[in-house]
Amino acid sequence: MHTTLTINGTRAAHDVSPATLLVDLLRDGLGLTGTHVGCDTSQCGACNVLVDGRAVKACTVLAATLDGAAVTTIEGLAHGEALHPMQAAFKEHHGLQCGFCTPGMVIAGLEIVRRHGTAVDEATIAHDLEGNLCRCTGYRNIVTAIAAGARAMETTHA
Amino acid sequence: MREFALERPATLAAAVAAFAAGGEAALLAGGHTLLPAMKSRLRMPDTLVDLGNVPGLAAITRDGNRIWIGAMATHATVAADPAILGAIPGLARLALLIGDPQVRNRGTLGGAVANNDPSADYPAAMLALDAIVETDRATYPVADFLQGMFATALADGEIITRVSFAVPTHAAYAKFRHPASRYAVVGVFVAKFDSGVRVGVTGAGPGATRWPAAEAALSARFDATAVDGLVLGGDLNTDIHASAEYRAHLAGVMLGRAVAEATG
C-alpha cells in the first residue's frame, strides 16, 4: 500500500505491506535503526517514536494506518552535530549504560515534557516512565537526565 | 504476523460494508489488543478494517446528565478531556491507570469496551455509571451489553460508535494493578447518584459485575466505614497472580479506597 509519511521532516511515499509494523518500516525499510525492538509486545518502550508529536510504541502500530502522519525517531532530534537538549542531558548525566533502551527513553522524556511541561518534577518523571524498561536498571540517572533535559528545553525552546 | 488485506474506509457505512466483504474480518481501533493477538497468531483475519479514517468517532459531548465519548477516543484523551474531568473525574482517573503513556496514546475506549477483557478497567465504570453503548445499528444498556469473559452483545462486524456514562455526584476508581501487565488484579468503581450508589468490580471474576451488598450499604451511608470488612462473594478467579480468596479480600480493600477517594 502506498503510504505517505513525513519521517524526520522528509515527506515521502512508502510502499508497505498491510502487515508492516511502523518499527519494521523504520528499521528494515529505511535503515533508521536507532528505534529498537526490545520486547515486541508493547511492554518495554525501546521502540518509542513520536507520531504527530505523541509518543507511541512503534511495534504496535501498522505503518499503513498512519498515512499522512509525521513520525519523529531518535535520528530526527539532533540538528547536525548539535544534540537535542534531551539527548545532551542523557549524555551529561550518564542516563545510559548499555544504551539499548536509550532511544525510547529519550522519546519518553519528550512525551513527559509535552504533557507536564519543562518544570516537571522527578516523581512525575519516574511515574511516567512506567512504559519503559531499562534492564541495566539505570533509572536513577535516566530520571535525572529527563529532568535536566526538560529544563534545558525551556531555555532553548527546542 | 500473517499477511492480510487492510481497508481504510472513510465512512461508517463503508466500514460495515468492508467488514462484510472481507472473509474473516476484524475491526482495528487502537490495535493494542488486536495487533499483539495477531502477532501471536491468536487472531488471523483475512481483512483488517481500520476505523481511524471514519470521522466523528472520537467526539466527546455532554448531553444533560450524560457524557458521551466516541469509541475512537484514546485513553489519553479520556484522561485529559476537560468535559470528562469536570463531570466525572473518576472516569478520567480510570483512563489514566490503563497501560502506560504510550499505550494510552493509541488504545481506545471502543476497542476496550468491545473486547470486554475480564481484567479491563472500563467495564467496572460502565456498570457503576449506568453506561449505554451505541453502535452502527443498536443501543444497549450496559446490563445487556456486557455478557461475561470477552463476550458482548455485539454481532459480528457491529461497530461501537460511542458510549455514554451517567454523571454522578461522586465517583472514584481504585485498582490494584498487576505490576507487569497493568491490568486490574481487582478494580472497583464506586459512583453515587441521588437515586443511590452503584458499584462495579472488574478483574475479580470471569466478567465485570455489580456488587449489590456494597451498593446497599453505601446507599444507606456513603462512607468507607459502611463497607469496612466487606468481602466480595461469588465465583472468583484463581490464577497465577492471585487466589479467589485473595481477590475477594482485595475487592473489599479497593472498595474502601474508592469510597474514601470519592468522599475525600
Image (tube, rainbow, N blue to C red):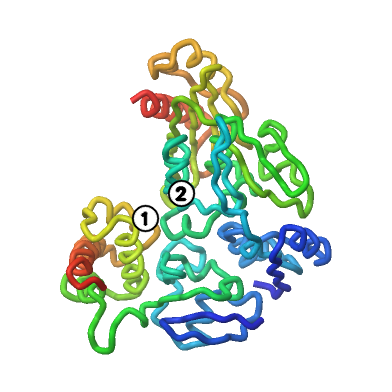
- Specify the subunit that label 1 lies on: A
Decide: is B215 above or below A102: above
Relative to residue B161, is residue A50 drawn left or right?
left
Residue at image x 75%, y 51%?
B158
Foreground: B244 or B135? B135
Q: Where is residue A152? Give x, y as percent.
A: 18, 69
Specify the quadrant that holds the C terminus of chain A.
bottom left
Relative to residue A115, is residue B248 drawn left or right?
right
Callout 1, which amino acid? Glu
Res. B53 image quadrant: bottom right
Residue at image x 54%, y 66%?
A60
Pick out the residue farthest to the top.
B220
Residue at image x 29%, y 75%?
A98
- Specify the subunit that label 2 lies on: B
Dot 1, how many residues are within 10 Å of its Cα: few (below 14), some (14-19), or many (20+)? Answer: some
Q: Where is residue B48? Give x, y as percent.
A: 70, 66
Foreground: B59 or B47? B59
Res. A65 image quadrant: bottom right
Q: Is residue B87 visible in the rendered structure shown here?
A: yes
Decide: is A130 above or below B200: below
Q: Which residue is mark 1?
A: A130
Q: Where is residue A51? Give x, y as percent.
A: 46, 70
Dot 2, how many residues are within 10 Å of its Cα: few (below 14), some (14-19), or many (20+)? Answer: some
Q: Which mark is residue B222?
A: none
Q: Which residue is mark 2?
A: B182
Specify the quadrant that holds the N terminus of chain A.
bottom right
Residue at image x 54%, y 46%?
B60
Q: Where is residue A85? Give x, y as percent.
A: 22, 74
Task: Please tell me whether mark 1 sits on a helix, a strand or a loop.
Answer: loop
Callout 2, which amino acid? Arg
Foreground: B157 or A134? B157
